[in-house]
Amino acid sequence: MTMKKILILCVLISISCFGTSIAQNSKADGYKGIWFTLGQFSEYGDKYSGGLGTYTANHIPMAIYAPEVKKTFFTYGGTTSKDEKHLLIMVSYYDHQKGVVPKPVIVYDKVGVNDPHDNASISIDDKGFLWVFVSGRNTSRPGLIFKSKSPYSIESFEQIREGEMTYPQPWWMDSKGFLYLFTKYTKGRELYWSTSQDGKTWATDQKLAGMGGHYQITNVWKNKLVSVFNYHPGGDVNKRTNVYLAQTEDYGKTWKTIDGQLLKTPLSDVHGPALVRDYEAEKKLVYLNDLNFDSKGNPIILAVISNDFAPGPKGDPREWTIIHWKNGQWNYHKVCNSTHNYDMGSLYVEGNIWRIVGPTEAGPQKLGTGGQMAIWESTDEGKSWTKTRNVTQNSDRNHSYARRPLHANEDFYAFWADGNADQFSESKIYFCNRKGDQIWALPYDMTSDFAKPERVK
């Protein structure tokens, strides 16, 4: 390493250590996804590992289609080269008219970090400005908020805020501004919310739930925001269980149950009125994947229900499950089984067609995170499901974390990353169309400013 490189590295480390963060809006020479291993090994491999550029399920949303400019903007966890684990917070877009992507922009360089828990979420306000919410990690690394300097542009970002926030889930609520759901490590992973009319001045953080720890997924129907979450008995994430729901229709002023009962926040009663199902009593674990709504605005939850936190047959069957509120009650429907707790997919609702895109099929690293992507469809509100297509087949690496863009366009319908779940590898970023019969890999190496994604056969 040259002296110049050593000096640059020292400056960057110093910046990181003293908590001063600057937007670094240089461009990368291609779409290189981050590879990660949690390092919690058992008989059948790591708890989760592989290409995790679109991780976690609790970073929502990670892509948004903007019809005003006919582009899908997205964020992902990148890295510096195929043989390095150096997390870069990346932003880019797919131009639907031209069929090209630009060189991706580095919104923030996570110097010294290789952990995709620090990935970001993305939002677009009513003036077209892009907002990137970068996840922190516990209290050791702060979360960051960036705003584009021009509408619908990824060229330059300015830092707006720094604070304690993990698993960012920002929602722009039309003229009211942001209703922001996130996590703090106060007593375990506890859920909070905050509001802001302009993204710069924020109300005091308020706690939504604290029962020892939670993972949540959120979504918005008209003026209603719904949060669905599990809980961690004794703060142990390996015991994650139960399903809860809280919703607000007044920008967080009040929270209610699914049937309209007023909730007192922060929620602290494990068996309180927000409880959807007591999976703890059934000795089942709950891995939340996605949340959507039927045509009447009733919530539909997609989860993987498991018997054990570790990989391998002890956790089988791992059931992809639909939990749907209809006619004043919760209805439960099985979709399929898969091989890993972190086989994460997304749920789409389009009229009477419900569709799931996810790694439900065994991949080359059979018992590792992810697998082969498939599409499942239901035309009877989730009661029965049919696999309509194998999206990926015969790949060398597992595909994982299929993400649903907000307002998804049929040509950039789901995007995800691949990676060897058993050993360090390169990781590419992919997307597919609605039918799943056309898959593209984003260019891993780029020499020009724009390039067409590579069609994968």
Image (spheres, grey):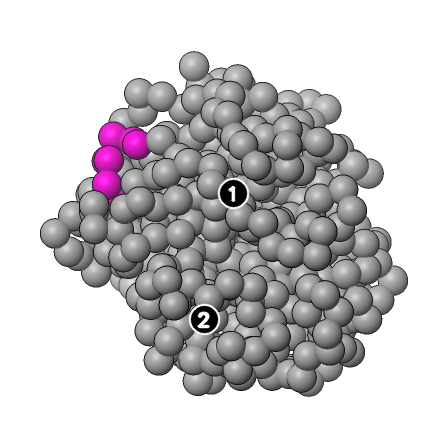
Residue 333 badge: 1
Q: Quadrant of the C terminus?
A: top left
Q: Position of residue 271 (x, y in %)?
A: 51, 77
Residue 281 is left or right of residue 182, and the answer is left
Q: Does residue 133 appear in this view?
A: no
Magenta extent: 362-368
Q: Position of residue 418 (x, y in %)?
A: 37, 36
Q: How many numbered dots are placed on residues in this image? A: 2
* Residue on which disc 2 sits: 231
Helix, strand or loop under label 2: strand
Q: Quadrant of the N terminus?
A: bottom left
Q: Position of residue 321 (x, y in %)?
A: 48, 46
- Which amino acid type is marked by label 2? Tyr
Q: Nearer the viewer, mark 2 or mark 1?
A: 1
Depth check: give the residue in front, 176 or 343.
343
Residue 45 badge: none
Q: Label 2, label 1: how many angstroms apart (C-alpha)?
A: 22 Å
Above/below status of 328 relative to 164: above
Residue 321 is left or right of residue 449, and the answer is left
